[in-house]
Image: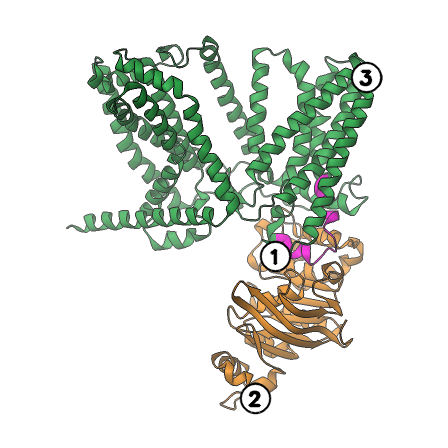
Chain colours: A green, B orange
Amino acid sequence: MTGSEGSNRETWRAAWTLSRTEWRTTIRNVRSNTRQVVGFAVIGLMVIGFPLSLWEQTTGFGRDVAAGTLPIGTVAASYLGVAFAGGYVGFVGGFNQSRVGVVGPLIRTSIPPTAVSIGRFVTRTVEGFAGIVPAGFVLLVGVGVGAGNPLVPAIIGLGAVPILGAGVIAGRLVGDVARYGNERLRMSLWVRAGLFLGLTIAVFVGTQAVLTPILEEGNMFGPVSIGAILPGAPIQAYASLVLVPLGATGGELGVVVAVVLVIVVAVGFVTAIHLETLLLVRDVGGDSATGRVEGTHGVPWLLDVTRSGRIAWRYLLRTRRDPRTLAHLTPVLFGALGMTGTALEDPHRLLSIGPPAAVIAGAILAGGAYCLNPLGDDREQLPLLFSSTSSVAPLLRGRMLAGIVLGLVVGLGVGIPLALLEHDPTFIVGQSVLAVVLAVASTGIALGLGAAVPKFERREYMNVERAHPSLAVTIVFFMGGILVGAIGFVLLWVALTETLLGGVLFLLGYTAVLGLVAAGGYWYAIRRFRALSLDGM
Amino acid sequence: MTDDASAIAASGLTKRYGRTVAIDGLNLDVPDGIVYGFLGPNGAGKTTTMRLLTGLIEPTTGDGFVDGVHCTDRASLVEHIGLLPEEPPLYRELTGREQLHFAADLRGIPWEQLEERALDIAESLALEGDLDRRIDGYSKGMKQKTAFIQAVQHDPAVVFLDEPTAGLDPRAAKTLRELIVDLASAETTVFLSTHILPVVEEIADRVGVLYDGRLVSEGSPDGLAAGSEDGEADLEDAFLELTADPERAWQ
């Protein structure tokens, strides 16, 4: 055995040790927390449930294949989906490299950097596959049941492997490059947040533009050619090659694509590992070197009146300096994009649904920003908080106030200008009052939810490691916020267009109910956190 | 309530985590206006004791009083204490000055009342020029200094300091020791937990040694040192003996 072989073996052994340990810690972390176990169980059910909801289509597909009809277009479209899924897993793994966290220095000084890169690659990829492979397996089972033999799903499944691998590698390289650019350019955090938002919207809009015509034709699962939406010839040629054992005719292009896929996987893996090792060794950039603002800012007079106001200002200041304090709202952003997408089909809708959407988004922002995990968010500062203030109430009110300020910037700042173009002054006044009511109520309700399901454990989400609010609570709050806000606008519409007295009475009742629930949330949060100690974490 | 002369008093203070006994029937009586050095090896329960006495966690059994207030009465306790925990509790996005303002706001004390004292301490610690920089750009020592000012700027009756000189350069560490002595001179009781025995030897009026959750010895630094087997007046030897053979100490 040469020295190089020994060194390679040592590198792979170290990488395996790292991966195995990270998986073990991840599993132990999940198992030690009942809520996480339940959360994973729910996600697992969704992963299995989604392909099961397509059972009819997948078994129909299998029957077509067994009957001699080879739906090459559908297989190619599925492979494209597999490539995108792999690309997503790869991108996330490449972009989020802070995972090693506190043990990073130990790992970096204990095993070769290449082993760290390989270990991270394998860990993140396998973890990402945990959400894809089971779903794919269920889909293939459906195909097998429809076809009446296991050969069909086995062939299609094997054919998907190079596609998945190439997707992962390509995504990983893009993620690595994005991370390198992100760290190298040292842009301010707000510029980065803006770029991220712009990129997300561009991807969303692009996907809408591509998929909408297909979905409207209703033949997503039919034997369609995907050439209409993407240059699909190569991937269809590859699908034909994969289906040769089932009677399809393979062509030269299919062979070329297969060879290219294998090369992409091999060369891409080596390139990604080299690149990541280089970045690891050079330790380019880093959060501490970016966007540091110097200078103390006094509290604006409007917030300087009360203790809660001054506390609120600190939260707003922290967010202004580091938008990652709102990283937990990313799912809300993605959800909002879905609604925004409907405006793409008819820009005029922006003026009709825009004002209510801005008010509802403002209300969700008000509660979601600082109240969904009120004390978990201050995890590191709890010794200061507990030993400084006799009641958590001023702190919680400070969080509410900060959220209300942010929420009204959107609810009134965006909602009113949009409403001015389409609506009469009465509606604008009504909408503005509703915006305030919703924003205030939202913070109280969010406090209650955050107090019911506090999260103190740190975890990485959107490349930000801190005690994020519960994802389930965030989503429930978001969906509930849309519903409650929509009801408010319906009542406002009734009051202004149908029956003024009845509508106003309903609105008053609506406000009273919201006020009671919000006050209940605030009261519950104070009760719950008054008794909180470090024992409860 | 407890003896008026006691700044800190504990009686049978016990903290259990499942089957693990972190603090086992601790009895303490710390008079007003002294520096009390709290020693013990890693895992002895020093931090747990400080957390119990400052109301961050609740005792399983027993009582603790700080300035006459029961340690579970957190609402009243906060008016009497200041705390510098092992990890400085600071918001990295704020500047040092904003952090101190924030701490004042938490206590509901106008900053103007604390400003002179806080800035004097900052000047002593050579931090004044950095107060308008963001904390995420601070060194470990600068964070420690900021957290120290935060703990004492409101002039509490009892200050709990957990390894206050950690991360400080020799000059800053010396200044901090002098500030601690000044605090005691001004009738503030300082409960000082540290591993650095020369610090305790230099500034503590009284020393308690904790081992395995139990107080195995207590007395003046000189008295403890004189009790070491080799007869040399050395607190380090006494500490090593006590924590190597606690049974002898308990006897």
Identified at 79% across, 31% down, the residue is A512
Of helix, strand and loop, which one carries label 3?
Answer: helix
Reply above or below: A311 against A499. Answer: below
Identified at 69% across, 21% down, the residue is A356
Instruction: Say which chain tag 2 marks.
Output: B
Q: Return the residue at label 3.
A: A426
Name the amino acid type tagged 3: Thr
Q: Residue furthest bottom?
A: B231
Q: Do discs 2 and 1 share a chain?
A: no
The span from disc 3 to disc 2 (Cα, nearest Å) is: 86 Å
Q: Quadrant of residue A241?
A: top left
Identified at 57% across, 50% down, the residue is B137
Q: Do discs 3 and 1 share a chain?
A: yes
The answer to whether residue A289 of the structure is visible from this angle is no
Q: Return the residue at label 2.
A: B226
Of helix, strand and loop, which one carries label 2?
Answer: helix
For the residue pair A56 and A371, the one nearer the viewer reads as: A56
Magenta stretch: give its range. Answer: A381-400
Q: Return the residue at label 1.
A: A534
Where residue A216 sits: x, y (%)? Answer: 48, 10
Name the amino acid type tagged 1: Leu
Q: Quadrant of residue A480?
A: top right
Where residue A66 sits: x, y (%)? Answer: 26, 15
Mark 3 vs 1: CB contact within 8 A: no
- Mark 3 Cα shell of 10 Å, populated few (<14), some (14-19), many (≥20): few
